[in-house]
Image (cartoon, helix red, strand yellow):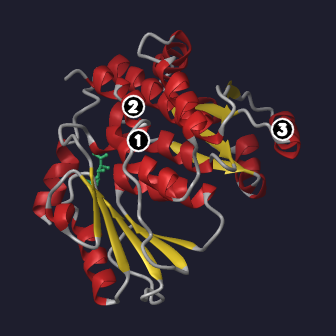
């Protein structure tokens, strides 16, 4: 399957009905996942505020895991070493363990397995399958939101000229993509960074407002080779963030390339911005003459461990 076709499959994924079943009462949520699977924990932890959420992206697990913990292990392949180890520890500690995978070792592990119906995608292209069970399970979407999310995602494809133009400006001048987001989409800025890494094979950077006003702001004015950065900023609805963006741009003499959201609901805006970054990084990869699907070195590294 051509990668653009694979990306276009996101619109079907937002309709996925998989749903985390919290089972008994829980006090906190712990989510384990790496790379293209780990990102869903980051996104969820930014939009879910009812109970504490801890993310695991490595081997060590927090000491507070207990019977009161709802533990979710997310791994598209179901075979990621760090995530399996964390799930095993969670089982030992008596947590309720939910796994989200297309099979592999985690495919029938734990108290509930949410089975992703396709195993032929790149993990990072299955973000809808892995995120929707959180959105559905924790009541973060209703039917109207899903309908809108489907519609805005469908409105984007690899022919989108705006995505193409941003990619062209980055590739023509061999710039380094810098992505700035803001709550509740800081994690989407991170998703873009990782998509630039994997699809376009470039080092990229991300941060978010207002945090970057306490560090990056100095560097924006005076760093080395500032003109080698291509800085994209997600437009914000919040007055205080808008003001910060404008002042930062003026004080640091930095041109920001604004990326506009589409949609009203959180789900629509979230998936739209995720998808926009998918195509932008896809085009950049194509323009650089690299294969967006190639993750050979990541796989070799896993084997070598
Ligand atoms: C590859 C990719 C990687 C994987 C990561 C973890 O497309 O995106 O970042 O997601 O190596 O593997 P899984 O997702 O199978 O647990």
Q: Which mark is residue 214?
A: none
> What is the distance, in whole Å, between disc 1 and disc 2 at their CAs?
6 Å
Lower sequence index among marks 3 and 1: 1
Comparing 287 with 121, the one in front is 121
Q: Position of residue 171 (x, y in %)?
A: 46, 20
User: Looking at the image, do the residues carrying marks 1 and 2 touch, with CB atoms under 8 Å apart?
Assistant: yes
Callout 1: 10 Å neighbours few (<14), some, many (20+)? many
**Can residue 70 be seen in the rendering of this structure?**
yes
Q: Which mark is residue 128?
A: 1
Which image quarter: residue 197?
A: top left
Residue receiving disc 2: 10
Q: Furthest-left residue in view?
A: 303
Comparing 123 with 198, the one in front is 123
**Can residue 202 be seen in the rendering of this structure?**
no
279 w.r.t. 138: above or below: above
Comparing 63 with 136, the one in front is 136
Lower sequence index among marks 1 and 2: 2
Residue at 60%, 34% in the rendered image:
144
Residue receiving disc 3: 242
Comparing 79 with 96, the one in front is 96
Q: Position of residue 127 (x, y in %)?
A: 39, 43
> What is the distance, in whole Å, between disc 2 and disc 3 at their CAs?
30 Å
Mark 2 or 3: the one toward you: 2
Residue at 42%, 88% in the rendered image:
67
Mark 3 or 1: the one toward you: 1
Q: Quadrant of the C terminus?
A: bottom left
Q: Is residue 50 left or right of residue 99?
A: right
Q: Quadrant of the N terminus?
A: top left
Residue at 23%, 21% in the rendered image:
2
Q: Position of residue 238 (x, y in %)?
A: 82, 42
């Amino acid at each position: 399957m051509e990668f653009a076709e694979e990306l276009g499959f996101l619109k079907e994924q937002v309709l996925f009905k998989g749903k985390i079943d919290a089972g008994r009462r829980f006090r906190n949520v712990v989510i384990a996942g790496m790379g293209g699977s780990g990102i869903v924990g980051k996104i969820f932890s930014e939009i879910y505020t009812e109970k504490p959420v801890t993310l695991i992206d490595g081997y060590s697990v927090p000491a507070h895991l207990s019977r009161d913990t709802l533990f979710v292990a997310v791994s598209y392949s179901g075979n990621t070493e760090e995530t399996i180890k964390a799930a095993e520890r969670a089982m030992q500690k008596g947590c309720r363990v939910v796994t989200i995978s297309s099979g592999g070792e985690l495919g029938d592990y734990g108290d509930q397995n949410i089975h992703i119906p396709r195993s032929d995608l790149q993990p990072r292209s299955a973000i809808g399958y892995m995120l929707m069970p959180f959105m559905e399970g924790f009541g973060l979407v209703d039917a109207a939101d899903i309908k809108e999310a489907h519609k805005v995602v469908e409105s984007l494809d690899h022919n989108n000229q705006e995505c193409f133009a941003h990619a062209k400006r980055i590739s023509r001048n061999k710039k380094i993509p810098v992505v700035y987001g803001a709550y509740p989409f800081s994690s989407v800025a991170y998703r873009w960074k990782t998509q630039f890494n994997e699809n376009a094979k470039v080092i990229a950077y991300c941060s978010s407002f207002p945090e970057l006003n306490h560090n990056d702001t100095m560097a924006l004015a005076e760093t080395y080779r500032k003109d080698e950065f291509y800085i994209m900023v997600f437009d914000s609805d919040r007055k205080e963030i808008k003001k910060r963006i404008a002042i930062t741009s003026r004080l640091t003499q930095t041109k920001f390339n604004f990326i506009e959201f589409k949609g009203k609901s959180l789900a629509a805006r979230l998936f739209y911005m995720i998808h926009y970054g998918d195509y932008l990084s896809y085009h950049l990869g194509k323009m650089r003459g690299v294969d967006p699907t190639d993750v050979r070195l990541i796989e070799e590294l896993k084997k070598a461990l």
